[in-house]
Image (cartoon, rainbow, N blue to C red):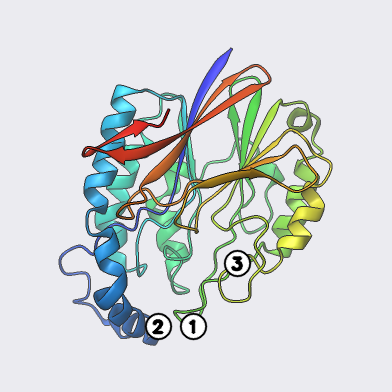
């Protein structure tokens, strides 16, 4: 049986009208980041809504079974961003014929109060098919993808006080839960186990990477049915983890001007065919 799965990330929708007419803006992290956004960052994602609409058009033209989304819908985690932007993301995720799964990015969980907002506005895509396997944090999430595949999502994003610190970490409880989950017979028997999170699996960095990436990779070692999906880095790429047959795919950013991208996977039994989507002539198309 064949399956088609689309993975995208890092939309960074533009600030909606009235987003900063609230006391939320006076958080020191947001004030400093706003200057950076106005002077440098914002222009790169000014057409993010157009690109998201372009993905919707692609999904109507090229239907997929599942959509996997690795976060960073917003910029500052403001409540107005959630109330205006989350329904737009829900429309995209709802175009999958059989379901979707999402995890937050560091810009979604910008300050401590954002976790509750994320759970509220993305609740429909945080459902797990194995809730008993989750840690007290609610992750990892499990979504069966047909008979031969499964997606497992865990949350590596966490708020920091300084806007220049965008590092992530897998909570210890989720590491332990993931280790147990990958040994479940119904998981281990699947031909394709898609692991999805926002941060790169193998980039340890104090200010930008996944601080406990080595601990995560120790858990993944020796499991050759894995397919690793992430975002955070705004350029698309793929490679095999060193000394393994495990492929890693970074979706890049759906909306960054000049680098718009996503990955499309076609599964046929044990075969996985990956193709990258790119923005060409004001629409998304698959690269040859």
Label 1 packing within 10 angstroms: few (<14), some (14-19), many (20+): some
Tell me the residue at 15%/65% (across/down): 17
- Of mark 1 and mark 3, the one earlier in the sequence is 1
Residue hosting label 1: 161
Q: On the image, which quarter does residue 39 sit in?
A: bottom left
Residue 14 against residue 197 in the figure, above or below: below
Residue 31 against residue 119 in the figure, above or below: below
Q: Nearer the viewer, mark 2 or mark 3?
A: 3
Residue 24 seen in the current view: no
Residue 5 against residue 105 in the figure, above or below: above
Nearest the viewer among 217 and 107 is 217
**Where's the C terminus, which quadrant?**
top left
Q: Are marks 1 and 2 in contact (CB under 8 Å)?
A: yes
Residue farthest to the top?
1
Residue hosting label 3: 209
**Where's the N terminus, which quadrant?**
top right
Residue 216 against residue 181 in the figure, above or below: below
Residue hosting label 2: 29
Q: Gap in Å between the C-alphas at discs 1 and 3?
A: 16 Å
Please tell me whether mark 2 sits on a helix, a strand or a loop: helix
Label 3 packing within 10 angstroms: few (<14), some (14-19), many (20+): many
Q: Looking at the picture, how far across and down is residue 218, in whole percent?
A: 81, 54
Q: Gap in Å between the C-alphas at discs 2 and 3?
A: 19 Å
Q: Looking at the picture, how far across and down is residue 49, in whole percent?
A: 23, 50
Please tell me whether mark 3 sits on a helix, a strand or a loop: loop
Q: Nearer the viewer, mark 1 or mark 3?
A: 3
Please tell me whether mark 1 sits on a helix, a strand or a loop: loop
Left or right: 143 with respect to 187? Answer: left
Nearest the viewer among 273 and 99 is 273
């Amino acid at each position: 049986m064949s399956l088609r799965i689309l993975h995208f990330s890092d939309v960074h929708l533009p600030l909606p009208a009235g987003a900063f007419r609230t006391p939320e803006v006076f958080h020191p992290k947001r004030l400093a980041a706003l200057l950076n956004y106005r002077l440098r960052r914002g222009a790169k994602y000014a057409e993010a809504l157009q690109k998201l609409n372009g993905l919707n058009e692609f999904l109507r033209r090229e239907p997929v079974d599942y959509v996997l989304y690795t976060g960073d819908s917003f910029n500052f985690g403001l409540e107005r961003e959630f109330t205006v932007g989350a329904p737009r993301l829900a429309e995209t995720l709802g175009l999958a014929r059989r379901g979707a799964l999402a995890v937050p990015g560091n810009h979604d969980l910008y300050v401590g109060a954002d976790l509750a907002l994320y759970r509220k506005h993305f609740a429909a895509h945080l459902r797990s098919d194995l809730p008993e396997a989750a840690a007290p944090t609610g992750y990892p999430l499990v979504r069966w993808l047909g008979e031969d595949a499964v997606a497992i999502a865990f949350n590596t994003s966490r708020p920091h006080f300084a806007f220049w610190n965008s590092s992530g970490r897998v909570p210890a409880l989720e590491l332990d839960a993931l280790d147990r989950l990958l040994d479940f017979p119904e998981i281990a028997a699947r031909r394709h186990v898609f692991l999805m999170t926002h941060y790169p699996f193998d980039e340890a960095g104090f200010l930008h990477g996944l601080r406990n990436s080595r601990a995560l990779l120790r858990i993944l070692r020796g499991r050759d049915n894995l397919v690793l999906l992430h975002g955070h880095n705004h350029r698309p790429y793929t490679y095999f983890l060193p000394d393994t047959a495990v492929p890693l795919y970074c979706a890049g950013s759906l909306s960054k001007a000049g680098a718009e991208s996503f990955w499309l996977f076609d599964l046929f039994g044990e075969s996985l065919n990956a193709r990258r989507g790119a923005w060409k002539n004001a629409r998304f198309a698959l690269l040859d």
